[in-house]
């Protein structure tokens, strides 16, 4: 486990400014993000925001079927919201393999990190049946927006990527069979 620094709950720009400045960025410097930046982005994605265990993004029934993974030049990590830390799953730089799984979108390879949002749809279907997929996909959108706005607040760029081979991403990340990748969100310093 890799312990992350505590996230900040006050920033230097307003939410309105972050919304106004948010743009899809596909030109990144091949530069590492700090552990503080990574901590803040992961917290924005799925961090615990209350003593009752509620998270930074809304989820139908507070079921939280999403799993958050991070790829960097240091390896593959899984975010553990309850402890605000990451578990290192794989050594080595997987960014090129992830870019290849996304049909050669090479900006994934140069971004400091990529956040992968994956969903366990079965975890929510027991309760919401036919509407489960809709609710889960809405949650993924909330998480993605939080990541993008947090990136802006940190002076970074990001882009939401939906064009990829699910099977190829699952293979690169060695995801459990019950998880379906929904988004790849590269985050990094703008070139």
Image (spheres, grey):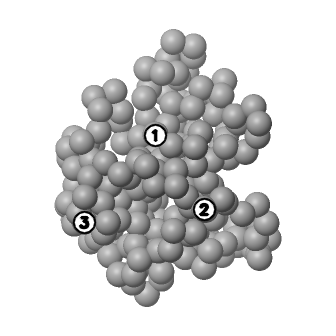
Q: Secondary structure at mark 2?
A: loop
Residue 5 in the image: x percent, y percent?
Answer: 60, 62
**Which residue lies at the image location 70% right of the left edge and 36% below the top edge?**
54
Please identify the quadrant where the C terminus is shown: bottom left
- Disc 3 to disc 1, how far (Cα)? 20 Å
Taking the image as shown, residue 185 lies to the left or right of residue 150, namely left
Q: Earlier in the sequence, mark 3 or mark 1?
A: 1
Vertically, is 189 above or below 113? below
Taking the image as shown, residue 6 lies to the left or right of residue 33, namely right
**Contact, mark 3 vs mark 2 (Cβ under 8 Å):** no
Residue 33 in the image: x percent, y percent?
Answer: 47, 74
Residue 30 in the image: x percent, y percent?
Answer: 35, 81
**Which residue lies at the image location 46% right of the left edge and 40% below the top edge?**
67
Residue 6 in the image: x percent, y percent?
Answer: 66, 59
Vertically, is 26 above or below 56? below
Q: Secondary structure at mark 1?
A: strand
Nearer to the camera, 88 or 126: 88
Q: Secondary structure at mark 3?
A: loop
Q: Classify residue 110 by image quadrant.
A: bottom left
Image disc number at residue 67:
1
The residue carrying pointer 3 sits among few (fewer than 14), some (14 to 19) or many (20 or more) residues within 10 Å by Cα, namely some
In the rendered image, which residue does mark 2 sit on? 5
């Amino acid at each position: 486990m890799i312990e992350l620094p505590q996230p900040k709950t006050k920033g230097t720009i307003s939410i309105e400014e972050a919304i106004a400045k948010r743009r899809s960025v596909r030109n990144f410097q091949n530069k590492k993000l700090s552990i503080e930046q990574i901590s803040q982005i992961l917290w924005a994605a799925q961090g615990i925001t209350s003593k009752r265990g509620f998270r930074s993004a809304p989820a139908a029934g507070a079921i939280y079927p999403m799993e958050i993974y991070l790829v960097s030049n240091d390896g593959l990590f899984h975010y553990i919201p309850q402890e605000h830390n990451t578990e290192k799953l794989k050594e080595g730089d997987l960014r090129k393999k992830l870019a290849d799984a996304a049909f050669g979108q090479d900006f994934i390879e140069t971004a400091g990190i990529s956040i992968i949002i994956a969903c366990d749809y079965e975890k929510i279907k027991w309760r919401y049946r036919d509407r489960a997929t809709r609710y889960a996909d809405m949650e993924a959108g909330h998480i993605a927006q939080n990541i993008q706005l947090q990136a802006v607040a940190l002076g970074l760029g990001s882009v939401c990527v939906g064009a990829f081979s699910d099977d190829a991403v699952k293979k690169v990340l060695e995801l459990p069979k019950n998880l379906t990748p929904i988004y790849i969100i590269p985050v990094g310093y703008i070139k």
